[in-house]
C-alpha cells in the first residue's frame, strides 16, 4: 500500500493527509476482496523501520489506529471478519495501541469459522482448485458460490527479517528445552513457519504493490517465496476496484492451470506512504 504520502503532497500539499485517503482505499479494498472471493488479505500497516519516521507522523498513525479500531471491530462482527495482527516488536507500541490490538483480536477470534483448513496448504504446497473469479457472459464476474469467510491480517510494528530471527531463536530455545525433539536436525522450513508471526495463515499466492516500487521492503520474505508479484503504477489511494479485478483476472488465468487458491497480500510500506483505517 505504497504512495500515500506522495499522494497527499500532490493533492493537498500535505503528505500526512494522504494517510487518510489511503485508509479509505484499504476499507474499499477489503470490500472488493470479499466480493471477489479472496479469503485472506494481509496489509503492511506499519513496519519496524517506520519507527524512524518523524515523531509527528508516528503519533498521527498511532492515533488513526486508535480512532478506528473500535469501528473496525464493529464491522468485523457484522461481516464475520477475523482480524489478526502480525507484530514482532510489540514492546515499541504505545500501551493504548497494544490494548486495542489485543481487544480487536480477541473480539474477532471466533469469526470466520466457515473457513476450513484445506489439505496441502503448508510450506507452499499446491492446494485444491478454488477460483476466485469466474467468467460469464463476456466480462468475468465474481464467483457465485457460497459466501466465504474472510480474514484481515494487519502487519503492525512488523519486519520480516526480525520475524525470521525471532523464529530461529524460538527454534533453538525449543530444542534446548526439549519442546522440539531431534536437535538441530529438527529445525526445518516447517519449524520456522510455525514460529513466524504469520503461523496459521496460508502462504500468499498473489502479492500486489502500488506506486511503481518493485521491491518487497522486508515484508513476508519467507512466506512470499512463491507468490506471484504484481506492480501497479498508481499511488495506493488511487487504486480502483477495476485495478484489483485486473490483477485477479490475470492471476486467474494461471489459477486454472495450477489449481492454487487466491490469497491476496498487499504491501503497505509506511516508509513511503500511509493510510487511514476507517470502517
Image: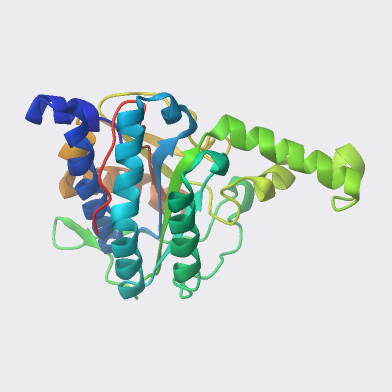
Q: In this view, does 153 lie above or below 158?
A: below
Q: Position of residue 179 (x, y in %)?
A: 85, 53
Residue 239 appears in the rendering? no
Residue placed most toward the observer, 187 or 254: 187
Q: Which of 233 and 109 is in front in this view?
A: 109
Q: Could you tell me which quadrant the C terminus lies in?
A: bottom left
Q: In this view, does 181 lie to the left or right of 276?
A: right
Residue at left 23%, top 38%?
A: 19
Q: In this view, does 277 lie to the left or right of 199?
A: left
Q: In this view, does 47 lie above or below 147?
A: above
Q: Quadrant of the N terminus?
A: top left
Colour mapping used in the image: rainbow
Residue 145 visible in the snapshot = yes
| Residue pictured at 41% horizontal, 38% vertical | 46
**How many discs mark residues in the rendered view?**
0
Query: Quarter of the image holding residue 232?
Result: top left
The relative height of residue 234 versus residue 244 in the rendered view (above or below) is above
Tell whether 189 sits left or right of 152. Answer: right
Q: Which residue is drawn at 55% across and 44% down?
A: 90
**Front-most of residues 138 and 116:** 116
Q: Which residue is drawn at 43% across and 57% down?
A: 100
Question: In the rendered image, which quarter is residue 142 located in?
Answer: bottom left
114 shown above or below 178:
below
**Place of residue 149 in the rendered image (x, y in percent of width and height, measured from the top left):** 40, 69
Give coordinates of residue 28: x percent, y percent. 21, 54
Q: Where is residue 115 in the image (x, y as percent from the top left)?
A: 47, 70
Amino acid at each position: 500500500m505504497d504512495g500515500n504520502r506522495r499522494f497527499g503532497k500532490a493533492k493537498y500539499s500535505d503528505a500526512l493527509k494522504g494517510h487518510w485517503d489511503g485508509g479509505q482505499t484499504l476499507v474499499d479494498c477489503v470490500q472488493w476482496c470479499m466480493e471477489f472471493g479472496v479469503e485472506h488479505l494481509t496489509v503492511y500497516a506499519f513496519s519496524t523501520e517506520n519507527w524512524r519516521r518523524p515523531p509527528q507522523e508516528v503519533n498521527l498513525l498511532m492515533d488513526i489506529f486508535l480512532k478506528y479500531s473500535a469501528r473496525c471491530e464493529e464491522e468485523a462482527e457484522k461481516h464475520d471478519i477475523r482480524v489478526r495482527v502480525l507484530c514482532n516488536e510489540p514492546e515499541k507500541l504505545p500501551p493504548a495501541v497494544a490494548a486495542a490490538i489485543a481487544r480487536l483480536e480477541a473480539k474477532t477470534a471466533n469469526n470466520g469459522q466457515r473457513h476450513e483448513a484445506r489439505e496441502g496448504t503448508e510450506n507452499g504446497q499446491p492446494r485444491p482448485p478454488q477460483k476466485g473469479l469466474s467468467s460469464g457472459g463476456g466480462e468475468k464476474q465474481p464467483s457465485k458460490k457460497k459466501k466465504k469467510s474472510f480474514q484481515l491480517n494487519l502487519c503492525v510494528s512488523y519486519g520480516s527479517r526480525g520475524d525470521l530471527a525471532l523464529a530461529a531463536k524460538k527454534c533453538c530455545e525449543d530444542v534446548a528445552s526439549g519442546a522440539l525433539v531431534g536437535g538441530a536436525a529438527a529445525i526445518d522450513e516447517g519449524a520456522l513457519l510455525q514460529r513466524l508471526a504469520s503461523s496459521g495463515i496460508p502462504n500468499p499466492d498473489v502479492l500486489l504493490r502500488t506506486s511503481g516500487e518493485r521491491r518487497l521492503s522486508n515484508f513476508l520474505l519467507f512466506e512470499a517465496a512463491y507468490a506471484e508479484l504484481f506492480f501497479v503504477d498508481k499511488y495506493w489511494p488511487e487504486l480502483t476496484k477495476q485495478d484489483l479485478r485486473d490483477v485477479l483476472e490475470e492471476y486467474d488465468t494461471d489459477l486454472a492451470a495450477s489449481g492454487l487458491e487466491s490469497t491476496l497480500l498487499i504491501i503497505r510500506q509506511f516508509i513511503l506512504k500511509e493510510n487511514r483505517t476507517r470502517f
